[in-house]
Amino acid sequence: MILDRSHVTLHHSALETTFRGIEHAVSTPDVPINQFRGIKYAHVPLRFRQSKLYTSYPSIVDATRYGPICPQSNQKSFEEELIGLPDSDIPRQVFKQDEFECLNLNITCPAGVHSESRLPVMVWIHGGGHRGSGSSWVYDGGALVRKSACIGKPIIMVTFNFRLGFFGFAGSPVIAEDNKAVGDDGVGNHGLRDQRKALEWVHHYIADFGGDPSNVTLFGSSSGAADIVHHLYSSANQQHQLFARAIIQSALVEYNVPDVYSAGWQFSRSISPLRVTSIDQLRAVPPEALVELTCPLRAIDDGVFFRKGWRDALFPQPESEEMERIPLDRNLSSLRLTARKVKSKSRSPHPSGRISVLPPSIPGLQPLIIGDCGFDSYLWSDPASQWSASGVVRRLRAICQSLTKATALLNAYEISPHTSPDDLTDRVLELVNDARVAWPTECVAQAALRSGSDVWRYVFDQEGPARGIPHHAADLIYLFDNVPLPLSPTHSPVSFDGDEPLPSLPSSQSSGGDVGDILGKTRTLDDIEAMDVDQFEFGWRHGDNDDGSWALPVVDEWTYGRVRDAMQERWISFACGERPWNGSRSKVFVFGPEGETGERSAGIFGGRRRRALWDAVLRPLGMGLVQKVGVELTNGPGLGAR
């Protein structure tokens, strides 16, 4: 590389071109970081057609600016909305939108690398559903790459854009026939296939940027993490693995992936306002019009993309006799396992005392780090708050089509027609959290274990600095370290068993409150597990308010830096092919609350997630039904249905 003020150049011998990039803003004289932006990796020949790998470049490529993104509404990204910063603190980015030129990627790497460097590569898949960008400031790779260089484990990070919404996931029998006529196998999943094309480009061309094409880690969050699950179970991954391992963060995995005909029905219903009658007319619709329509699809089971038997291998199927064993009594507090109320002491993976018949496994899956955030359902707080208690009861009975099944769910989450409005939203969000994120995450982890893969399980319960709860995308704040935060300079002298030793500090410097009194001293794991729930609360400190309300914790520089460093270092170590932590089946790694980090026992995991309830109630109902309930509740009651 040749440094020219703020610009750098890299000659790519395989592509016979020179890329002109920038020196990243996080660079320092001792740790210079470079970034190459907007490099085209594939092109789109026609709307709803598969992308083609891009391999021909001019002699000099300007890689100093981000490329176009897929057309989408001009709103904040969902990460920006969840982070909770005021508009004045959010960096403004304006990207050109072009459905045919949006397939581009960004490469962040230490300066001075070359084709012999063979550094590990981390490829990020962004979330956001029908809107988002691989060029977002939220997950810019500068800080993570700089961290890797500082700890002596340098990596290269790649982010990229792909088709979203109907541009990336429209599918129907008509589109399938049209594509088949030109040799495109399968239908829909264009966004997923774009992602695969990006991995192909990395495999072929990352070496000249200093990367090792045989040492690629795929990581992502939310719908991006769900996409990783789809790639793991894809036919293409079975035939040729383009990544060595994966990190799955709060995946929104859908069980009810439609087939081509079901997808076509949903597609036709969504585009009915356009009044188009042919594929040619649909291709002529301005992209601005398609953007305004809600796309209900993220993947299609078209008989081509996924490997055979993927769904049965991934999710447990209910057995007919299991319904008879669902507890229907109202006293289910021992099963709810809400960490703010109950702490499980079970060490058994089958808390109910029975062993279900395991679903079939699919061998050959890559090693995984997988976990979720404690309050991922915060993503759906607004629609959840619109429900009335009677409305929830009626809707669940209608979805379940069985009084027994509906009663099991309602009792498990303590919802009745008489539930107070103050309690209802929290209980609906608990059900949504389990149905859409927490239990599916556990199912993906267990399926990977059955396949023989190495699996490292974590829970992220650290508070988001701006909102004070472990909300969806809170982990991204710590992982990428790009969010401007008003952190308190307070030093928190909290030490946890299993953490790195901390200097002892006077008790007067304790963080205060009940948890500060308990955790301001180093305790053994047995001490922590033996605490009553009144002593050890999940994520929130009980304040001194007279009304008994819960006070939001303060995320100061110490707790922020502690969780950030723990997460970054373990993700980087994993990308380097190392064990991120011990990772035995009886252990889980915790991030938070209040700066806690370290490996913990299965008992701690059972107390922070409702694992016993999943096994006793959700498993007999089946993932298909449970996710239907979750989706309906996140859609809100609708007009006149509260």
Image (cartoon, grey):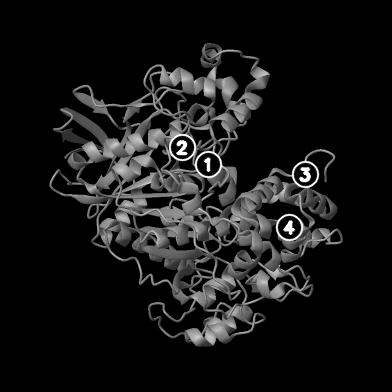
Q: Residue at x 64, y 17 (%)?
A: 274
> Where residue 188 appears, x then y in whole percent?
48, 30
Circle 4 — which element?
helix
Whether residue 325 is situated above or below residue 517 in the rendered picture: above
Q: To which residue does mark 2 refer?
A: 133
Q: To which residue does mark 3 refer?
A: 637
Circle 2 — which element?
loop
Q: Residue furthest right?
A: 418
Does the residue at mark 2 contact the one at mark 1 (Cβ under 8 Å)?
yes
Q: CA distance from mark 2 to mark 1?
A: 8 Å
Q: Residue 410 falls in which quadrant of the image?
A: bottom right
Earlier residue among tags 4 and 2: 2
Circle 3 — which element?
loop
Q: To which residue does mark 1 refer?
A: 128
> Where residue 306 appears, x then y in whole percent?
43, 41
Question: How many other residues sit within 10 Å of disc 1, few (<14), some (14-19) or many (≥20)?
Answer: some
Earlier residue among tags 2 and 1: 1
Q: Amino acid at mark 4?
A: Lys
Q: Amino acid at mark 3?
A: Pro
Earlier residue among tags 3 and 4: 4
Does the residue at mark 2 contact the one at mark 3 (Cβ under 8 Å)?
no
Q: CA distance from mark 2 to mark 3?
A: 30 Å
Q: CA distance from mark 3 to mark 1?
A: 23 Å
Does the residue at mark 3 contact the one at mark 1 (Cβ under 8 Å)?
no
Q: Residue at x 48, y 79 (%)?
A: 493
Q: To which residue does mark 4 refer?
A: 405
Question: How many other residues sit within 10 Å of disc 3, few (<14), some (14-19) or many (≥20)?
Answer: some
